[in-house]
Amino acid sequence: MDNLYSGLLLDGKHYDQIHRDADWDLSFWSVQARKYGDPVLELACGTGRVANTLAIEGFRVTGIDNSDTMLSEARRKSEFQGIDVEWVLADVRHFELGTTFPLIIFPFRSIAALLTAKDLEACLSCVKKHLKAGGKFIIDAFNPDLDIMCRGSEDRYPFAEYPDPEGKGTIVVTQSNVYDAASQINRIKLFLKLPTRTEEMIEELNLRIYFPQELNALLEYNGFNIEDKFGDYEETYFDSSSKLQIMICSISP
Ligand SMILES: C[S@@+](CC[C@H](N)C(=O)[O-])C[C@H]1O[C@@H](n2cnc3c(N)ncnc32)[C@H](O)[C@@H]1O
């Protein structure tokens, strides 16, 4: 599996509509860029939600993503906004940019797209090659929610309701999920009810669940030093009730 999204969810215009209100993490990334950044490398940048925000603030940003449909929307928006962002079509597990960055960020839980420890390790090895001496690598991952993982496979929950980017009405998305405890992959089925079709479309979204001690260990065994671990964008220290694992890492000396 190369990408956590497929079909309509990999269409940048749909992605942006689904996440049209998602701005709660942007000031956190601006603060990190002011502290550590310039230039900034964003892994799995999608349609540029974070990258474009930083570029508007004056940071030099490179964004990499392995979806050309997401990147073409990112490029369209940056051109429209008159900002210069370097967009690179690449896999976060295998990239070679020939330069280093003082700040590499992996926002919006995209680490969940790395379905195996091997995938994460390949990504960490690329990060190490691209991180400047003394630079920071910041990850924003979910803290696993056991209630979601224990849901019955037939149960349906709301996922999104958004205006069709082509103006044809409202798209309603519901979800069901099955958590596979052996692989730690949450297999989500998305049911899309389009205004133009009677039957639902079904798309799959596989998310790797990284448990807190596992993620710490994977980072540490791969040569990263965890300088801070927060549970939210206000930088509250990570604890049992945290929804997120936000990790500020550097390369161990
Ligand atoms: C949740 S979106 C995040 C987009 C963006 N960072 C944001 O904050 O809105 C996840 C992105 O990861 C990208 N992606 C998934 N697997 C990838 C991989 N192996 N290499 C590069 N990008 C990947 C997808 O194409 C998608 O754009």
Image: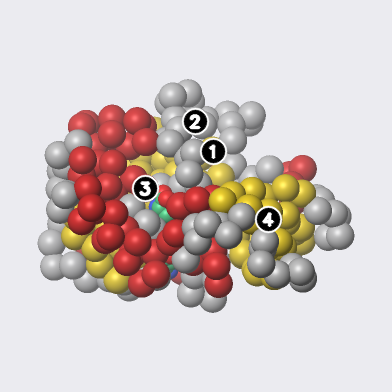
Please tell me whether mark 2 sits on a helix, a strand or a loop.
loop
| Residue 134 visible somewhere in the drawing | no
Marks 3 and 1, how far apart at CA:
19 Å
Of discs 2 and 4, which sits in the foreground? Answer: 4
Quadrant for ligand 1 reads bottom left
Q: Mark 4 or mark 3: which comes first in sequence?
A: 3
Of discs 1 and 4, which sits in the foreground? Answer: 4
Instruction: Identify the residue position indicated by label 4 in the image.
Output: 173
Instruction: Identify the residue position indicated by label 1 in the image.
Output: 244
Q: Identify residue type, mark 1.
A: Leu
Q: Residues within 10 Å of mark 4 (few under 14, many from 20)?
A: many
Instruction: Identify the residue position indicated by label 3 in the image.
Output: 49
Please tell me whether mark 4 sits on a helix, a strand or a loop.
strand
Q: Mark 2 or mark 4: which comes first in sequence?
A: 4
Q: Residues within 10 Å of mark 2 (few under 14, many from 20)?
A: some
Pointers 3 and 1 in contact (C-beta within 8 Å): no
Name the disc covering residue 42, or none: none
